[in-house]
Image: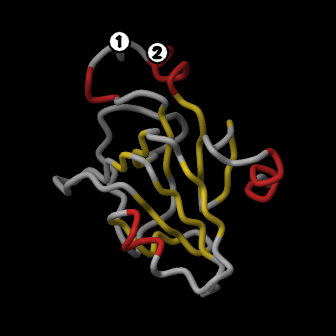
Amino acid sequence: MTHQYTILFDAVVIPGGGQPDCSAIAWAEDIVIALGSDEDVRAISRGDSHFVDLRGAFVVPLVEHDPAWPVEAVLEVGGPADLAVFSTNPRLGGVQSPADLAVQTVAIVRGGRLVSGSLPGASHGDDDAYSE
């Protein structure tokens, strides 16, 4: 496994599966390696990590092809780095159809790679580093 980690922080990570929310997530290649507070997750870096400030965006597990809420998937250490980033909290309602989620979805990450949208707080060059 690489020591080049991607660390998303200043977020609301909703891992699912009854787990409590946290504020940061990290992955290496395509595997989640940490979930927790900004301080705890940032502390795992060995200096060559890629940090992205999500500016309060919401991170949820991604299943299948399109972002959905609620989801049966779980973000967990050792699991796949498949996630969606929403601009608003999907738990607060306002999601009446898949089209509503499409408007709120700002990024999709599959296998640790940005495949759609852009990560809040990342510069254009940072986004390029994630795209395939």
Tell me how far mark 1 sits from mark 2, CA to CA: 6 Å
Q: Is residue 69 above or below residue 102?
A: below
Q: Identify the residue under disc 2.
A: 100
Q: How many marks?
A: 2
The x, y position of residue 15, in whole percent, is 31, 53
Disc 1 to disc 2: CB gap under 8 Å: yes
User: Which one is in front, 120 or 99?
Assistant: 120
- Placement of the C terminus among the 4 image quadrants: bottom right
Residue in the picture at 60% in, 55% down: 52
- Placement of the N terminus among the 4 image quadrants: bottom right
Q: Is residue 50 above or below residue 98?
A: below
Dot 1: within a 10 Å radius of its alpha carbon, few (fewer than 14), some, or many (20 or more) residues?
A: few
Q: Is residue 16 left or right of residue 79?
A: left
Give the secondary structure at mark 1: loop
Find residue 60 and report its image quarter. top left
User: Which one is in front, 85 or 64?
Assistant: 85
Give the secondary structure at mark 2: helix
The x, y position of residue 9, in whole percent, is 48, 56
Q: Identify the residue under disc 1.
A: 96
The x, y position of residue 67, in whole percent, is 48, 35
**Amino acid at pointer 2:** Asp
Q: Is residue 29 left or right of residue 40?
A: right
Residue in the picture at 26% in, 51% down: 21
Q: Which mark is residue 106?
A: none
The x, y position of residue 2, in whole percent, is 64, 85
Residue in the picture at 28% in, 18% down: 93
**Amino acid at pointer 1:** Gln
Dot 2: within a 10 Å radius of its alpha carbon, few (fewer than 14), some, or many (20 or more) residues?
A: few
Find residue 89 and report its image quarter. top left
